[in-house]
Amino acid sequence: MSATAVPPQVIDASTLPATGAGAKTASGFYRVKPGDTLDGVAKAHRQRRADLLSWNKLPADGKIRVGQLLRIAPPAATGGVPSAATPTPSAPARAKARFVWPIDGSVAQSFKGKSKGVVIAGPADQQVRAAAAGRVVYAGSGMKSYGKLVVVKHGANLVTAYGHNGKLLVKQGDPVKQGQPIAMSGTDGAGISALIFEVRENGKPVDPLAWLPKL
């Protein structure tokens, strides 16, 4: 498939969901404010410090940053993404669930409202994986709201996009296999580690969760 088959306007930066410090925080998460400490957050939400350390993969000293998105409820209660080492089988209702999760993390913002994809919060500097086999049709940082962006085309009518990466591992025209690392995760303008993941079918945005293994 020619790399020119998908025009650049397939990704509309104006429809990107908010991920900065002023963004609405999903249920089960807390955005760190000035003066917050991990112990204080744990106490306020009636959780154990050790659990917050584990759920958020924080350093042992519990250091947190203003604007950082913290999980304050168990993964099962907030839609945690399954580990790549232990894939979750698709539910019968998700007949199209032929993708793999692009990163390990949690869905911090779902597909609704003005968003055209989902936001997956997770540790920085982890591999971002191709959700399915395809060909890279865009890899660069020409769209400011998306940061370092990779767009992969799968067949004739399906495209996936991966935004807010820290480092790109592929270039335009590269073929990729399902699960192949295509980037390393990074942080957004507020210092929050969150991947924007979008799926377009026949040029229209669709809910990525409908294509992913059900939790």
Image (spheres, rainbow, N blue to C red):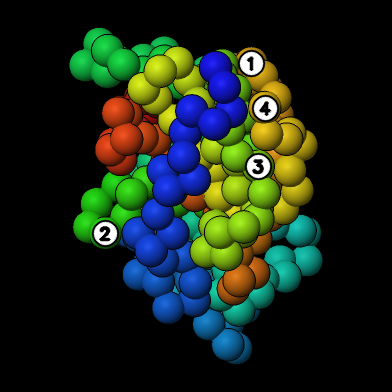
Q: Earlier in the sequence, mark 2 or mark 1?
A: 2
Residue receiving disc 4: 173
Residue receiving disc 2: 114
Q: What amino acid is found at the position of numbered circle 3 in the picture? A: Ala
Q: What secondary structure is marked by label 1? A: loop
Q: What amino acid is found at the position of numbered circle 2 in the picture? A: Lys
In the displayed structure image, the side of residue 152 where residue 170 appears, left or right: right
Q: Earlier in the sequence, mark 3 or mark 2?
A: 2
**Labels 2 and 4 touching (C-beta < 8 A):** no
**Labels 3 and 1 touching (C-beta < 8 A):** no
Quadrant in which the C terminus is drawn: top left
Q: What secondary structure is marked by label 4? A: loop
Local packing at callout 2 (Cα closer than 10 Å; few below 14, some 14-19, many 20+) is: few
Residue receiving disc 3: 139
Question: Where is residue 95 drawn, in percent x and y?
Answer: 27, 12
Distance Cα–Cα, label 3 vs label 1: 16 Å
